[in-house]
Image (cartoon, coloured by chain):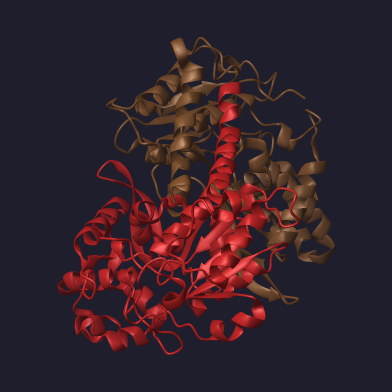
Chain colours: A red, B brown
Amino acid sequence: MKAERTFPGFCAAAIVLASATAFAGGRTSADPLPSWNDSTNKSAIISFVEKVTTEGSADFVPAPERIATFDNDGTLWVEYPMYTQALFAFDRIKALAPQHPEWKTTQPFQAVLEDDMQTVAASGMEGLMEIVMASHAGMTATEFEQEVTSWLATTKQSRFDRLYTELIYQPQLELLDYLRANGFKTFIVSGGGIDFMRPMTEKAYGIPPEQVVGSSIVSEFRMKDGKAEIVRLPKINFIDDKAGKPVGIYNYIGRRPILAFGNSDSDMQMIEYTMAGDGLRMGLFVHHTDADREYAYDRKSHVGTLDKALDQAASKGWNIVSMKTDWNTIFPAE
Amino acid sequence: MKAERTFPGFCAAAIVLASATAFAGGRTSADPLPSWNDSTNKSAIISFVEKVTTEGSADFVPAPERIATFDNDGTLWVEYPMYTQALFAFDRIKALAPQHPEWKTTQPFQAVLEDDMQTVAASGMEGLMEIVMASHAGMTATEFEQEVTSWLATTKQSRFDRLYTELIYQPQLELLDYLRANGFKTFIVSGGGIDFMRPMTEKAYGIPPEQVVGSSIVSEFRMKDGKAEIVRLPKINFIDDKAGKPVGIYNYIGRRPILAFGNSDSDMQMIEYTMAGDGLRMGLFVHHTDADREYAYDRKSHVGTLDKALDQAASKGWNIVSMKTDWNTIFPAE
């Protein structure tokens, strides 16, 4: 078993080497976060990573415990003016409407069919989930994955005229890479549907499906046409939002993160849970402050509301990352 | 980002090197599975792994899709004559009994208090789950983890006079290592409680908590004494058994395994689901045939019943691994 057993040690050595190369001489040789402007936030991130990875340091954390969790909508990709998954769901609701005449007079479906986005947004996360779940069930897991993959490969966001999977934040891609190069395991913990995210996270963020935690509908095992399949049912299983996020982390990951990154009040419990662990911890929020390059919204937005977290950030030691001042690039180059 | 980006490639190279070392000249240099006797099962495993890892082969599977799932009780560690977690639960039920006078006349609790194991076993997986859940709730996640860790560190199995975490199968440890050295990601998918397994799987099997799928009770996020915590509630959330196993795999992993290993009829759906995917697949069952070195039980056992799977194995192409003839060693050396 010798040959196999040397492999983990070899990889650990690779991590150490990679880190040493990148940060030799106080990161003069290569900046791991080039799309981040020099700022207190960037320094805080690098200082945190250096402390938890320095053996012998009081803040050292063994690699297997370096769990980092990221919200998706508004933290890793654009969520404004409406969650991408909601737009996918709206397209499906419209396509399925002829089979559901009751939707014409039942909210929030009526609002979708009438393109009344204000009423849809006002129905909140619960309303959006209802739309999402109703439009995502009654098919096999394989069929749903194909629907999502096809929609994401062909539908462009109107303002930027790019695929949604291209409207991901370059500074966060660098941060994810930087964390992984330092032995972190990176997870998504999102209110979005777990099976809507999984077809895109590996290619977009380098995060494999099994490291994605999200909301889900009930599914069941069935023999369909003689083939063992998972069939999706129109019933909510778990809402991975607000107080659901720490629960999702406990159920799916089973360890408390040491770093968590969100962008709205819905991420507060995840960050509270992260910060409440022993030892050094880090909690961050993206603040959408850049109407020119992306969007500017916070306290009064129906999508990605950031209000209480802004008020509590200073007293709780959370980092508020301003898109406008902290990031010199928003999206990957075309 | 160059230094970081080379890391995955470096590890992939390490995998290739490790495999090449182990198998140069048709694995003459080092047997990756020394505790497995030369047999059709051992050959089938090695042939499967070689095929799915050979680039250009019609059966090649990219590393990220090399998902292998293992049942725990009876597949990775001893489950006979009673599941380890049940024994832990019985100890806790007895300790908690003074606070629950109703248990004296309510099954299956009465049977636990009276050491009537036949009645307990007859209550089946559902009955066992009821005991497990009732005895595992009403505390924080952190407290429960400490209870489990402490019990596993101090309680010995009576026949073998060893800790339960030492009564793990050496041939399976070698198989897990062999699969990981060949780029597989190894998961546990067990009917057992997810939070009972997680404190022991990394040390025992090299499987981190986030790669453990199992049954769970409902938990919720609470601020307790000013600290953000997960609190465990006495309500079943998910039973990861029989048809629940493919559902657990879908929810937690999000990919269909290419290899699955179980030991009872409760693993049939997991193996059906695994085998039904496209391309080369492998499904295996441990058959407990060794009363001298471990235990012999199958069709009529209340624990780990192996009956229908034995009947269907040949026609469905499942491998039945006989503990007595396939394994030359059962447990790691003391």
Q: Can residue B273 be seen in this view?
A: yes
Q: From the viewer's perspective, is A103 left or right of B69? A: left
Between B235 and A214, the residue placed more toward the observer is A214
Above or below A97: residue A19: above
Q: Can residue A1 be seen in this view?
A: no
**Residue that appears at 30% across and 88% down:** A118
Give the x, y percent position of residue B120.
69, 46
Q: Quadrant of residue B303?
A: top right
Between A28 and B285, the residue placed more toward the observer is A28
**Residue that appears at 81% across and 41% down:** B155
**Residue that appears at 48% across and 82% down:** A306
**Residue that appears at 35% across and 74% down:** A79
* Quarter of the image that includes the C terminus of chain A: bottom left
Above or below A90: residue B206: above
Q: From the viewer's perspective, is B10 left or right of B214? A: left
Between B240 and B31, the residue placed more toward the observer is B31
* Quarter of the image that includes the N terminus of chain A: top right
